[in-house]
Image: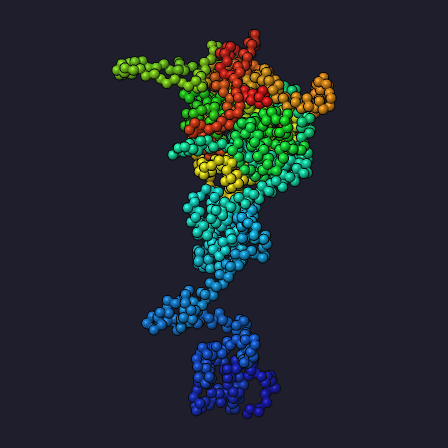
Amino acid sequence: MHNIPPHPSQPRLNRNYRTALNPNPTIPLPPANAASYRPVSAPPNTAAAPAQSSTPFPHQQPRLRAKKRTEKQKKRDKFAAIEKVLTEYPFKNVGEFLLTLFHNPDRDEPDPRGKKHSRSVARFLRGRTKIKMSHVFPLIYRHKASYPARKSVDAHEQKQMFATTGPVDQSNHARPYLSTWATRLVASEGRKQVGRATRDDPDDPDRTVQLRAQTNGRRANAHVVTWTELLSNFNLKWIASKYCIRLPLVWFCTEFWAAPMSKGVVFVRKRRPHPIIQVGAIASFIVSRNRYANGDLALILGIWQFAVKAHVDLKRVYSRFGYSVSDTTSRNALNTMSTAGFVELKETVQEATESGETKHALLLDNCQEFCEVYEQGIGRQSELKVGTAGTHITLDDCAPGAFAAKPYYERVAKQDRTKLKTDILHDDIDWPHLRVVIPLNWARTLAEYIPELHHLLPEINTMFRTEPVAKRRMREDRKTISRPLSTNSERSTELQGMFRAVGDFDGQMGINSEDPGDLLSWIRGDGASYANVLNLTDVCMPTGTFKNKIATPEIWHTGATDLNSTSANHYGPATSSDPSSLSKCSNIAGLKRPSNTSSCDYYPTVRNLTLIWKAGVLNCWRIHFETDDLHDYFTGLAAKAELPDLSSLLGDAMLLVDRYATQGAIKTSLSAEESLNPNRVNKIPAGSPWVAPKSSNPAPPDDDDLPGLDDIDTPVIPPKAPDDAPKFHQEKDGFTGDRVLRNSQIFLQDFGWWIEFARAVPEGDIGRVWNIMKIWIFKFAGSSHSNYVRYLLEVYCMLRYEASTDLRNAILDNWLLNIKGELGKWIPADLHQEHYNKWLEDMVRKHGGEFDDKFYRQTISPNVHFFLQIKEEVETAFDLERRSQTHTSANLDAELHLLLSAFKEEEMHLFRSGRSMGHKAVNQFARGWRVLDEGKLSTFLTKSTVLGKFLQEVRRKEMGETEDETETRAESPASSDFDHQMRSDSPTPSLPASDAPSDSDHSSLRSLCSQDSSSSYRSEPEDDGIDRSDAQLRSGSSLGAMTVHPETGVMMMDGVVEVEEEGKEGGQEDSGGNDEEENEEDAQPEEEAEEDEEEETYEDEEDGEQDDSEAEDDSGSDEG
């Protein structure tokens, strides 16, 4: 039967079909004759049952293929085969079998394994088979026999799971052994990875792990730390990614241990994100292995602790943790970086000097701190520590040769400044531009207050940043580079101290003060510093020891001086009932009145005056729209879809500004005839008739009203009012004007200029800033701040007559700083220096010593900028929200509502003939015009031409000219195009015919100023005659940057810093202490006969009397 050939219809079977059917030779296949097949597990003498054919055919065909077995049968056969192998073959146990199976011969000995054996094992270990080690190893680890039972003799091995001590093979059971073996293996690999991380990454040569705080030169390739590398390396996300690549096992283990999970998925918490915790742990591992491997985290955190003035115990503890380096290492690193920074600075300055350019400016300011000693003795007394701090400012956008000295001195020698007249100065102010930008500020105030108009704010912000509103904006992508210099203990408020301080700073920058060549150096500072530099220039010019120096007064102190001037002029008596006085407004809104209105705290005063000004502007808008409530009015317009567009609002704002905030409007409010003239365009609406109170100063009550008064033996004497308190103003008989309205108009005008100045600074629009500063020349001349009149006139003459076009552009384009390089973050340079001074003065108070000690000159002062920067970098790196350095300002909506209600009730911005309530604000602009025109300007020009006369005399002797020839040449027309350039920077906008200026606008301002200031010039009760131009700001002022939000355009206080109290134990040194003030009484101007203007009659209440004297700073004119 076995030789029967297959049927022709059946395919011929492959002779190797048995091999194909059974790839595993250890399991035998049944023979071809199925009837003779016997399973391996069957007894050898048992005969198989005869096969029963189920076919209907009489004959029986044998099966050519074995019957398919079930999985159970297959597994039974495999177990039987293993039993046979372990029984019949020479293996004592499974372990010996596995050792033989996985035998790994050395390369020197022959391989005793067969080809099938070696190939099968290799394929299995390489994962080329269906069953892999990943299937076998868990079976061994989880096998019930691999773990000792609790009652067995090996129960102690349960505690040897993941054993970290003792031999690896100390456990007999498989599970404890495997866990211990895996633990040791993972720990060993982790240690290797941490060891590799202590060395630089060969794949990233720009990153250095081992940063040395200092080096003694014995190590050839020691990498010394620098600020650039330290800050660039500090990026926690980058460090985490680096650790994940270089230390994958360590990173995985720490993440698996530290990361929270939800359903097997890792997520990051907000408060304690596990990647930051991992970075801190791994960085401390690396520092523990190698103390020089501090470049990732330890060094920068050590310097950060120094910058935030952490307690020394905190530094010691964190150093032990390995999170930061020691305090000594931090100080050594700071000293090293200071030295390297000065070397780099000198190279930069030297390179610019060799190319014939000046790429730097020196910003300086006096710094002082009163150090109190509580246990006094010999050599231990409380004293005022005084010094000078300086900062190197890198100049941008300067034309080649802008700071050439020779052309500058040639222009100075011409003395073209003597041609300056009051009319020229007045006409140089861009009045058409103000008629656009001031109404735009009024429109912004309304849009910020009304929610329905918020959609106009982006368009308003765009207008401020584009022409014609923008005059001269700085380049937006510019970032100012500044570097603090080492402090010294020189008194910059004295001439000799300023001379030595500037020489020290020049030496630090690598400038040869004795031979500066043909390059000018720009020195910048507050008013007192500016005055001393001018005086030194005049004094030292004959000796040639203080050559090629030009200076400018800085902007923030100028704005603060104007704020003090406005405060002194408008606060009035503390108990005033006049709603136009700031004292009454402060009482209504619950605001604090400054104790000294002539020298007030900066930011609290800004906050209060801004609120009152905003309330006044909104009340004018309410009157214009003839409504009782602006919110209800615009809500109704929004419901009817009739909201005005920006063009319409600007037209209305121009009318309101012309009505309430111009010199013409101020003049008109003093006369009922002019105010109520029906032919007058844009006149102020009339209010209800004014009924004067019976007595502005109520009489004391009668004795009958005070029971028990007779029982008092000693009468109570009321305290005497201070001499400098504002006097109660009494109008003359026949007064028909509205003094309350006029006071409000002056405030809206004066503080409106300050608002424009404050909003232009963060925008970087120096054209708008300079335009307001030119107005302040007149305003300061009309107040007691005569020093700043001289400062601003001096810088005006320098820019207009003596600076070349390139030099003028270089100064204007670098007058403001943008340290962050962000939109709306421009700040004045002197405010930037005040931030540095605050840190220095605080260190002096805590550490002691002098400003010229090595600790301050090498460790502290040169790194102040980076101290402020590193704090922000650390907050950003750790995903921390920036913490404000001051208390958040409370919302002032309630106070604003109270002011609006009071203004509405008092009808403050309506004309009420005869209204006067005891407060009189001076029109300082008009009065200043009169003061300058009547001799103040000519006096300044006479005293300020000392340098020009000296240079002219030197040139005359060098050229052999006679005095007549020199005078003839000096009278040649000036070649300055300053006026044309500044006006061309701001195109005059075209105004609609309906919005054209009325008769009261600036076209007749010169005659108006002459009339309006005649009596104001004679009597200004609010001024005490003391010049506080150089007085340092009061205690408690928060020196911060006024920034503008790039989207909303709202002014914000950014990086506000607190200034410590001055005047302790004898007071602080006055920053203007070098000025020798002499009080000179201005000659009383003669009365003009038969004055046609009623204003002269109504305003000159105190005929022939002048209650204040101008304090003029003459320290630099005659002493030289």
| Above or below 461: residue 796 | above
Farthest top residue in view: 1090
- Residue 223 percent across, percent down from the top left: 56, 51
Report the quarter where the C terminus lies: top right
| Above or below 365: residue 713 | above
| Above or below 632: residue 1012 | above
Residue 473 in sight in this render:
no
Which residue is at 67% across, 33% downward? 517
Determine which quarter of the picture holds residue 172.
bottom left
- Residue 252 percent across, percent down from the top left: 48, 59
Which residue is at 45% across, 65% downward? 184
**For residue 882, side relative to residue 160 (left or right):** right
- Residue 286 percent across, percent down from the top left: 49, 55
Report the quarter where the N terminus lies: bottom right
Give the color scheme: rainbow, by chain, secondary structure or one colour: rainbow
Farthest front residue in view: 378
Determine which quarter of the picture holds residue 587.
top left
- Residue 263 percent across, percent down from the top left: 44, 58
Q: Which residue is more in the foreground, 884 or 864? A: 864
| Above or below 140: residue 567 | above
Which residue is at 52% across, 73% downward? 124
Q: Which residue is more in the foreground, 412 or 757? A: 412
Residue 44 in sight in this render:
yes
